[in-house]
Structures are given as structure tokens and as C-alpha cells.
Amino acid sequence: MPKTTRQALMRIPSSGYWPLVCEYRFLTDSLDFARKAFARAGPVSRGWWIFRPSIYLMSAEANELVLFDREGRFSAKQGWDRILAALFPRGLMLRDGEDHRWHRRLMLPAFRHQALQRYLERMQPHIERGVDRWLASGDLRFYPEIKRLTLAIAADVFLDAQLDAEIDDISRDFSDLVAASMAVVRVPGLGRTWTRGLRARERLVHFIQARIAGRRQGEGRDLLTQLCQARDENDQQYSDDEIVDHMIFLMMAAHDTTTSAITTMMHALARHPDWQQRLRAEAAALPQRPGMEDLDKMVQCEWVFKEALRLYQPLPTIVRRSLVDIELHGVHLPAGTPVSVFPILVHRSPLWWTDPDRFDPERFSPGRAEHRRHPFAWAPFGGGAHMCLGLHFAEMQVKAVMRQVLLRCQWQSATAQPPRWQYAPIAKPVDGLPLRIMATPAGQGAAIAA
């Protein structure tokens, strides 16, 4: 960072956090971290990440400026490179401009309606087996169970692979990879979290590389085959390395973030049985084998899903680097400024949300529509050119899982105290969310046909 840029940033009010303390507090409780920084310095403050200055932007206006970014004034690649480049190189998050547009355009058909319908059909048997297992267990820690299920779904839908014998190893590799993204010590051999992440990536690279050659000429309908055979109007296609990089990131995002959202929903519904019953009645009105159009009718489930993402956003902060001088909230940010927006704080702001810490899905109903008070007051999927490509896949998967769970199960918390949440790098309950799951009494749900 140029000396003049660093000097300009030092004139911005301090968040009150210093190196190491900053990283520790963020990783320990990202929401409390953001609230205290905002209370000390307002919506624009100076902090640190991995021993380098960073500017924290904490407002809906900042979300819009940085994420929507129609003029291309911020770089996602330069923002994420230092954090993710060694772990998720060349993924969509780490591309800008025309390069990003080309890679995204080539990938887009794999996430359109027709493809999503095929994915929905493939995931149904996995969901049924998962619910069978949960009912047989009775008392369980839900987070590792749903993580296992969503990874099995991702392996089948994305790779046409059945991983029953390998699922625990693959799950551990993805967990190590995600954990490494928040590592402060990034020296192989010295930083244990970092080293585990690098080794996990090596294993995942070999796992996917071994499948590419056959998919170049194959006739499969899985995501890997589609990426292997995708060509643009000039007959250009992804290289093998690009396919590996895209698949690792997509599989991580598809199962880790969805796991987080479903876990949050199960936690909320365990403590609000009235909402559990409302959603059960809604699910029972659908056909036994619902298609995409049928899942769209799960409107109240969608409210709960959105409320879960508001309260416990899977990704607490999104980073960029400014390419030009910026003015925000009366503060000048020179070109080259590393910035972090904090949707996690905006999602709990009383400026936009009524009683923001309370679980209240009806805030997303047409009659209230609190998320419409500002276009970026609710931004769990980012925005602009980098809006999450898999958001419709995520919503479909969440509804497909919740429908079967609601019809076949009722559940409650297995502990009296609410869980403590880890917000970074992916939101999850520290205790794994102990639940007591029982079969739904006759007459309250509908049997799922085999």
C-alpha cells in the first residue's frame, strides 16, 4: 500500500481494534465486533486484517455502493486475493471485469430453471435417507448431520459421485479449507490451520482432476460435465485447472452456506413451534413429488429462510479494494483502499428492521416488506455483478429439505440454553445444535412416498 494511501487512512476514525486483537475479536463474535466498532466510530472506521489496514463500512448505503458497483469502482479480486487466493484461486469471487463476466456467462446455464429441476429430482432420495437416519437417531447434533447430507447432495448433483465411503474425509477437507480462509498465521508448517487447509485443497484437486477427462466426452447431466463441455460463441472453454477451481468453490458454497441456513432455520423453528406448525401445513399442501413451481408456493418457508439469513448470515463480511477515490458518509477513501462491508450489522440495524434481534419472519411478508426499506438492507447474497450465482439453487435445496423434514418430523431443542453462535468464517452453532427429533403424529403431516 502506498505511503500516501496509508497516511490518508490513518486519519479515519479508529474502530478501537489493533492487530491480532482485531482478528481474534472478529473470529470470536463477528456481530459484537461490528457493533462495538460502529458504536466507537460510526459507519466508516479504520481497522486491520492480517496486519494490514482495512476500512470497515457499516451501512446499507455502503452495501449498495460497494456491492452493486455498476461503475466498476471496486475490485473483488484485489479484495479477496490476500485472503483466498491460495485456497480458492481463480474462482468467480476472485475475478473482475470482462474476465469475470466471461466465466460467469459460461457457467450460467448450469444454474437455470431446467438444470435446477434436474438437480431437484436427484437430491430427493438423499433427503429421504437423511431424514430416515435422523428419525432413527432421535437425539442428535444437527449441524454435522445436515452438513453430511448437503455434501452428499453436492457430490451427486455436481459430480455424479456417491461418496458414502468417503463422505467424512471430503467433509473434513472442506471444513479445513474454509477454516484456513480465516487463518492469521499463513506460513506452511508454522500455521496449523493454514497448513491443514493447503493439504485439504491438494486432496480435493486430485479428487476432481481424476474425473475431468471422462466428462469432456461424457453425456452426464451433473454440473461437472456441464462445465467440462461448456463453450462460448467462439468455441472457447474452461481449462482443466479452471474447472477444478470452480468446482472446489462451488461445492464449498453449495453445501457450507446451505448447511448454515438450514441449521439456523431448524434452531428457530425448534424454539417457535407455532411457526413449525405453520410451515408444516404449507408443506402438506404440495404434491408428493413437487417440482420447482410447487416449491415456489412455500411462501412462509421462504420468509423463515430469509429471516434465518438475516439473523445469522453465512458470510459476515465481504471485502473489496477501491480502484478510484470514493466519498462515503463524508469520508474520503483514496484509490487502493481495502474495504470490508458488514451486512451482518446492517441486518440487525434498527434503522431498517423492527425489533431487529427478534425472530420475526413476517417482516418479509408483502404487508410489511421491511427488506424493501432499502435495496441493500438485506444482502446475504451480495449484489451487482458478483451476486451469488447459486442463490436459486440454495433456496430450492432449502425448501426441498425443509418440506420433507416438516412432513415427517417434529423437533425441539435438546438443551435449555440457546446455542452460542460462531459467525466466521461460516455461521454455525458452536455446540452443533443438539435437537430431539420425533416422527410427526398422524394427521399433522403427510407421508413421503417411497
Image: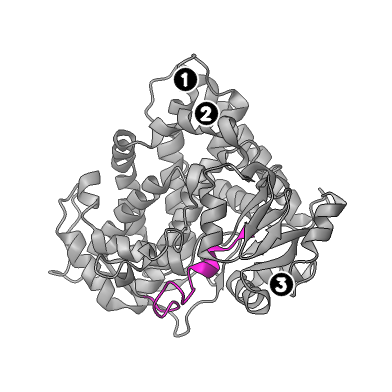
Instruction: Estimate the x, y position of residue 26 in percent, counting from the top left.
Output: 67, 68
Tell me, for residue 232, which label it has, or none.
1
Please state the extent of the stretch shown in magenta in the rendering: 340-359
| Amino acid residing under circle 1 | Asp
Vertical relation: 131 (above or below) 82: below
Which residue is depicted at the point 71% across and 45% down? 198
Picture coordinates of residue 326 (x, y %)? 65, 53
Check residue 344 for magenta coloring. yes
Residue at 29% from the left image edge and 34% from the top image edge = 114
- The label on residue 102 is 2
Given the image, on which type of amino acid does mark 3 rest?
Ser
Q: Is residue 176 above or below residue 378?
A: above
User: What is the number of the mark on residue 15?
Assistant: 3
- 57 or 379, which lies in front? 57
Left or right: where 161 falls relative to 400: right
As drawn, 365 above or below 50? below
Q: Residue furthest bottom?
A: 416
Is residue 26 in sight in this rendering? Answer: yes
Q: Residue furthest right?
A: 3
Asked if labels 3 and 1 touch by Cβ distance under 8 angstroms, the answer is: no
